[in-house]
Image (cartoon, rainbow, N blue to C red):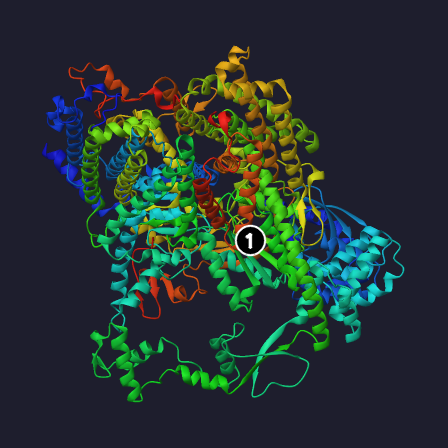
Amino acid sequence: MSPSAHLGRVHMQRLLAFFLCLMLALPAAAQDADAPIQQVMQTHADLIAKASRRTIQTAIDALTASGLPAAQEVMERWQDKEMWQDETTGLFVFVEEIDRDTIRIFDISDGTDLGEVPDDSYKQLKPNSGVRGLIAAGLVKFQLFDDSPAIRRLALDAIARDPEQGHLAALRDVIADEPSPALAAIMTRLERLLTIEFGDDEAEKIAAIAHFDGDLGVDARAALNPLVTTRIEVGEAVPEGPEVLRTLRPGDEALPKTQAYQLLVDADLAPPLIPASEVREALIRNIDGSTVAGVQVASLNTDRARNAAFATLVAEGLAEPAATEEEIDTALAAYQFFEVFIGAPPTVALAAKDVLSGIETKLALNQTADLALDAISLASIYFLAAIGLAITFGVMGVINMAHGEFIMMGAYTGYVVQLFVPDHTLSILLAIPLAFMVTFAAGVAMERLVIRWLYHRPLETLLATFGVSIALQQLAKNIFGTQARPLTAPGWLDGSMVINDVVSISYIRIAIFILALIFLALFLIVMNRTRLGLEVRAVTQNPRMAASMGINPDRINMLTFGFGSGIAGIAGVAIGLYAKVTSEMGSDYIVQSFMTVVVGGVGNIWGTLLGAAMVGSMQKGIEFLNPSNTLAAQTYMILFIILFIQFRPRGIIALKGRAAEA
Amino acid sequence: MSKTLFGTTAAVLLATVLPAAAQDCPIKVGVLHSLSGTMAISETTLKDTMEMLVEQQNAAGGVLGCELEAVVVDPASDWPLFAEKARELLTVHEVDVIFGNWTSVSRKSVLPVIEELNGLLFYPVQYEGEESSKNVFYTGAAPNQQAIPATDYFLEELGVEKFALLGTDYVYPRTTNNILEAYLKDKGIAAEDIFVNYTPFGHSDWSKIVADVVALGADGKKVGVISTINGDANVGFYKELAAAGISADDIPVVAFSVGEEELAGLDTSNLVGHLAAWNYFQSAESDANEAWVEAWKARMGEDRVTNDPMEAHYIGFNMWVNAATAAGTTDVDAVRTAMYGQEFPNLTGGTAVMLPNHHLAKPVLIGEIQADGQFDIISQTSEVPGDAWTDFLPESAVLVSDWKELGCGMYNTDTSTCVQIKSNY
Amino acid sequence: MTDTPSLFPKYAGGLGAGPQSRPFIARHPSVLIFIACLALFTLCVTILSEGFGIGVVSTSFVKTLGKTLCLCMVALAMDLVWGYCGILSLGHMAFFGIGGYAIGMWLMYARTEIIVVQSLAAAPLPPTAGEISQGIATQIFGVVGASEFPPIWAFAHSLPLQLAAIVIVPGLLALVFGWLAFRSRVTGVYLSILTQAMTLALSLYLFQNDSGLRGNNGLSGLQNLPGLGDVPQSTVSIWFLWASALALGLAYLLCAWIVSGKFGSVIRAIRDDEARVRFLGYSVEAYKLTIFTLTAVIAGIAGALYYPQAGIINPAEIAPIASIYLAVWVAIGGRGRLYGAVIGAAFVSLVSTWFTGGQAPDINLGFYTISWVDWWTVLLGFSFVVVTLFAPKGIGGLIDLVPSPNRHGADLGPDAGSLRESEADR
């Protein structure tokens, strides 16, 4: 290159640009291209740059086997997507991103700071999670011996995810020296799991298997199940030997005849069946002008005519007849079918089978427990959504179709509070009373403006509150948009309480359950132990009498309605935490809430509780029976409720006497 | 008197002879996206996109010497109303082209009207395929441009051996999952290693389903989730996933309906590493994309994001402009003919090509969710041609669509006949 | 007849006497006026239409008008069951939807059959009936990933049977549901919630793909009449307008006839005081069941006429909200008078279309622009509250302001503003 040869204006600019580039590229020139770790990387540069789980193992092995001290950091930073490649030189560097266009680069061998450069000629290496898993597995060799327990823990996680033969020996090396008992326990467990998979002899494996008797861990079952895999085989006679689990007869539940015959065909022991479409195809093959087998083609528009024509073709030897039922049976009868273990040697397989069957019983029990927990959780959500309604509808007899919108208002209040108070714990603590206040105010306003004029026209209350409901829903849309809004639970409610690998429940659901209990208590106390409750009950049963006793029914109605609405608001915060906050969330709960109250029996909080429990467990039960279609569960549940109301029109707990007429 | 008559006659004659000169100004572009109702959440963005594109085009001199005018109507997420509004656009407003629809059912509702009145529709959303209408250009992904590559990624890169196909109960997940089931069986995955579940729209109680998915791992195979869960329901699903402590390294989830917009409603810090497959991510690095994102944010606000269907409209609109320019008219048949083979650069790099089956050839991207609600692109294929009829279902494997050569959107290669000219709806 | 409820002193003489001897139409001039208005309206639209007239009214608007007539018809049914009999059913749109599904199945089947037969004609062998049916099933259910006809489609090939289904299925469902509900004396708001649950269950059921009715996609392309592919929609839309107008007219006559006779007196008595009517020896349940079933059938027929004009039916159409809107129309129009229901349905649905269609000009307040697309629902919701609170007679109540020379018998005829506050005054 001789830039001085061209001295046009344009070329000057180019030259300048070139030098500028050169200057910027200068730091790169300083990096150590000959460092051993860079050499190792360069050998596999293509594999690393276009990392795929299928091919990357070579590169990782080279790094781990290199014995270089820098290898660990290189792999860690590569895993964290902090390694980039210089596209011009092909050299790898560590990178710290400064902003969108600039990066600071470091030498991978010794971490020397090489300065800031534009990122144009560098390409970030983005190993996908499959590759990252393999890197992690490779890192185990270093991390397992690390001083920090956190890093050793990382190594153990990596082993659990991608176990390798080599890990077993490494694990056995470190178990004895592990200072932390928690880690040691994990190691022991992992060592057993790895022994089952990679162990040397059967006795060792069987011993490891025995340790998992009654263990509910998914990893234990994951290790055991592959051992008991079987395959159905076919032969002239059943071979003697422990690997044969059982013999099967074609036509059994485990071996339908078609499958059995297919096995014969696959083993070249029988001719393949002629497919049903052969009739049609044979006829088409043999069309001769406008006839086939002497029959007019146009007349072959019924199965009967086609079969007749096909029979003629068969008779003329122009088509193969289909095998008859007897022929198939004869073929099947000539052979034996049996199931053999293919996952492990028979002794190991039997030991695993034994342990698994023990686990199975326990598993079923625990699954039921988990389902029960789910049902309780769902019931508490329904209860929470319905409790406000139990007050406004159950106690006061006011149909409030806008109840769902009060739930929504509560949830949005929570969202707005989170906008201003970033601390999640504090914001939730603030949001709960605020949501109560907002919806209390809304409830009072609605009672004052709408409902009190309609106490004697319940059907019209229904319609008017429905009007309010659609208006509120649309208002929420106009204000907050139709997008779902985040309402994030505080950190200490993240995650779940894990009893074992089968039974677990998220903390947020536990919190909702507790909240539901608190509300139940609150309701009982307010209704039975306070002046307000007494007055509410009095007004509900006989407003005129109550009024003559000095109670102001207007005021009481207003407060009761506000109280019910306020509780709906708090329920909204809780529901928003576990699901979503949208303008339509209210309508998801309104019908269910009414159902809960009606099924339980109007005017009785215990009825509402029972109603929620019934609706919740029903739904989970149906979901369990029909796991692939959750929609069906809801349909059947509603049908059931419709029928239920036929038989107990006043709900599970029907009020008697005067209160019933309230 | 006779002079005017002569003039008129001449004008009429000229108009017939030179269609380009007779172009009615302004050229009307129909925008058929719900601005209210349940789908407004997604579709309003596309309406804004179209308005922005039309403005940009007008600033660049319009088309065929005419200003463009966007005619926006609101079908209100009401499927019958989509058909009504489409008819209104075509007969009352006499638009030259329509950009619109999101859900499959709304498209099926509009199809008969568009075909009857010979309109032109650009449909920007990934969909289940199994369709190729003469009057529709599908600028979103067909299953082989989203679902199949993502499944390949699961099989090859993540080593997934057991699949949970979770979807909302409607046609897109149903068809996609059917195709995937057939595809997975083709790849040697046993039927019992495929778990399928459908939930209603807006489903919120995910604990049982998430527990079921975890339990799938009990036979020692690596489990992956392919999610066609739609809209709001995703919020509850991901929250439950995070609560159950399922990391993307244990059970990766790849979603086909979760983009930047949907993640805006979520705290994504617990979801880092889960995946989505699209033809476009906002984080794509190209100059065109940078300009596009910048223009969008300048117009709509800093906190707004761009997403895949927006890019589909971007490509579709620009292709239509180029085709109309090439044809010299906005006449539907002329533009359609000019559309075949149209090329336009993608925002993610590479070039999109309009195929004779009315689908695009586009690259497929797989991104990992990041804590900031954006996606980190970890895999990008070369351009994949969209396939109207999937090869993995026996009924449709024999079908091809080729409007250029065969003039048929549903051509049976077995019998060499055109099954039907109009679409299935 | 023998036991004359004291509620209606004017009719103490029985049905045969006094003013009753005059012809039906003469006694109820509003019926004649209504029919005349309807006929005039139909004629005007026809003349202005693209298909048969001068083309001022676009085909899409003709369709809107035709659909509105169907909505008026179902509102009529709602008025009968709620305004006259006091049963606030929040599930009548379910019957409307069933009618639509019933006709939709035949329309889809027959249309697809033509396509399939055409395409199979090219095959080397003439198709068997089984192959045709298989082909149709693949075409119809291909989009939802199935290729078998579910049993529910057993009669889809036959127009007469599906036409019968329009009447029979909603009627039967209403009969069974009503029998169960009325038998166990479920009344008032309980019944409303129960009917709402019914329509919710039905729509959730239909939302499932496995329901056999194409799940969320529903049945589409219904505007294309089988075998009439060449007839332009501008013509078809007018045909349906005529059919809808005819059906509405007949339904109006039927309803007017029912409510003006003794039967009408009894059902209104049930509305006003159910217990008293029961004590008078009437079988309240039988009356309620008859009205409930009859109105379900009317709704079914209205639905069967509506959906071929809408072009698509899917489960969202029978979500609970639709039935609630139906109640809104009737309430705003004025319940307890037949023309009130019609006016309400026509007015609210057309105004809704106008506002949500983006035709209404936005109001710029300077600091905020009121866009009707966003605010219309809010306005509707609150105006609904206002109507319920302050104008329980609805729009129809305005007619009362016009002095009428002949008001005797007002309490009984379809003209009557029969809203009785005693309805809930237990």
The answer to whether A152 appears left or right of B126 in the picture is right
Residue B406 appears anywhere in the view: no
Give how far across and how far down residue B398 sits, in percent: 38, 67
The answer to whether C211 appears left or right of C239 in the picture is right
- Kindly identify which chain the residue marked by label 1 belongs to: A
Classify A566 as above or below B144.
above
**Which element type, helix, strand or loop, lies under badge 1?**
helix
> Would you call the spot at circle 1 few (<14 residues within 10 Å), some (14-19), or many (20 or more)?
some
The residue depicted at 53 percent of the width and 51 percent of the height is A623
Give how far across and how far down residue A70 sits, in percent: 82, 57
Classify A457 as above or below C101.
above
The answer to whether B280 appears left or right of C205 in the picture is right
Residue B173 appears anywhere in the view: yes
Give the residue type that dot 1 points to: Phe
Give how far across and how far down residue B21 sits, in percent: 27, 42
- Hey, which quadrant is residue A145 in on the image? bottom right
Q: Which quadrant: the N terminus of chain A?
A: bottom right
The residue depicted at 73 percent of the width and 74 percent of the height is A348
Pointer 1 residue: A624
Closer to us: B226 or A79: B226
- Hey, which quadrant is residue B356 in on the image? bottom left
- Hey, which quadrant is residue A59 in on the image? bottom right
Give how far across and how far down residue A541 sits, in percent: 51, 21
The residue depicted at 30 percent of the width and 47 percent of the height is C169
